[in-house]
Image (cartoon, rainbow, N blue to C red):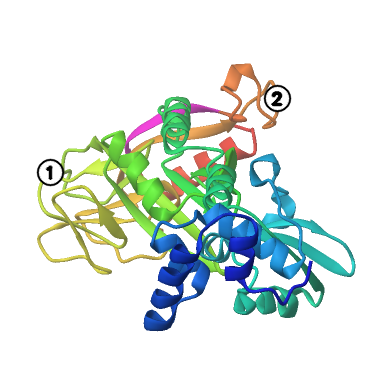
Amino acid sequence: MSRWKSIGQLLLEYGLTDDEGLREGLKMHKASGIRLGEAMVKLGKVSRDDINWVLSKQLDIPFVIVEDVIPNDELMGKFSRQFLIENRIIPLHETDEQITIVTDDPLNDTAIDFIRNSFGKKVNVSTGSGRKIERVLKKAYEKATLPELIASLEGIIERIRETSFYRMDFLPGKTSCRINIFGAGISKNIAILQGAFTKQDIFAAFDSLDIPFLYNTFTADNNLFLSVYPVVNTLEPTGRPVIAGKYGLCLPADITFTDTAIHGVAGFFRSDSPVQGYGYFATRKGGPVSENSVSVIDAAPEDFRECYIDAYIPEKCPSCRGDGCEGCNDLGYRFSVMEGLFSSDDLNERLKQGRDGKY
């Protein structure tokens, strides 16, 4: 097939339009400057799939039955989600010398050159249905749906409800999301979900569970790191610094300031320093402390002779020695309550002994 035959000629040759339809398409093409194929689709003279198939004939490249494509997760992970979706490209194969892709626009030189320059390889282009490419990409990136994220969060919360794990860390990747739990100086991976999730997806999942939270976001190597502190408990004011170490932070009885961002809860306001006369919730080590401060267990104020401690203390599970078993709900630790007036030295010693399995 000669690649120099025009799209119009090929549409006529294959009986996909008639002379009148082609004349209307050419008129729109000249008036608007859009491609002839695009004009024919806008006029309803042909389908997008018809144009993709004719392009494959014009350019002498393969036409791919997109619904038969099984995405290569490892190869897709080398591209940004936004790039593939915006350009309707599925990477199919990669060798030492070349990358093969399918796209609905084989004349998209900008995207093709970007792949060539990024990988330093020849790009073999095939074409296929844009609608079906979008469908395959959506399915590939939504292997774990929002309802599955919500169900996973519910399960995690049930497991850590009577523990010192008060923070959930999310590390969303291009094709998966890692979830860690953190508290009392212990970090543990609790789940890896297949699927691409955004910060907004994670916020929506907590909203659906009616859980307000404080949060921090960090970016490293262009990857998002999101720390979420659920706000679900109550704590009566005590008039002295408080150290809290249970699942979930404390709802404020009145106006409370915090050193992190806030989502979905009234009474909290952002400030990096205590505000005279108001409660202050510190979640970061080394934060300022006042009589009205409430600190999380591993960001506790040091050298205090008297604090009100309300915490679960982790003890390395004697059965599995931290590996995780049925007896410790696969967390590697069991937990005992520490509540009352203690010094910060008392707390630190209890934590050290517990983590070392000596308590």
What is the count of numbered marks? 2
Left or right: where 231 falls relative to 27: left
Amino acid type assigned to the residue bearing label 1 in the image: Ala
Coordinates of residue 124 in the picture (x, y in percent): 78, 67
State the quadrant of the C terminus: top right
Foreground pick, 211 / 234? 211
Q: Badge 2: how crowded within 10 Å, few (<14), some, or many (20+)?
A: some
Identify the residue at the far right of this view. Answer: 96
Left or right: where 31 falls relative to 130: left
Does label 1 or label 2 sit earlier along the sequence?
1
Task: Provide the residue span drawn in magenta.
Answer: 334-341
Amino acid type assigned to the residue bearing label 2 in the image: Cys
Q: Is residue 318 above or below residue 255?
A: above
Query: Residue visible at 32% across and 60% down?
Result: 260
Query: Residue visible at 70% across and 24% down?
Result: 320
Q: CA distance from mark 1 to mark 2?
A: 40 Å
Q: Secondary structure at mark 2?
A: loop
Per the rendering, the mark at residue 299 is none
Query: Residue visible at 59% across and 54% down?
Result: 15
Queried whether the magenta region covers residue 18, the answer comes back as: no
Prevailing secondary structure class for the magenta stretch in the rendered image: strand
- Residue at numbered disc 1: 253
Coordinates of residue 354 in the picture (x, y in percent): 57, 36
Foreground pick, 273 / 240? 273
- Residue at numbered disc 2: 320
Foreground pick, 252 / 358? 252
Queried whether the magenta region covers residue 336, the answer comes back as: yes
Residue 168 in sight from this viewpoint? yes
Query: Residue visible at 45% across and 55% down?
Result: 226
Foreground pick, 35 / 315? 35
State the quadrant of the N terminus: bottom right
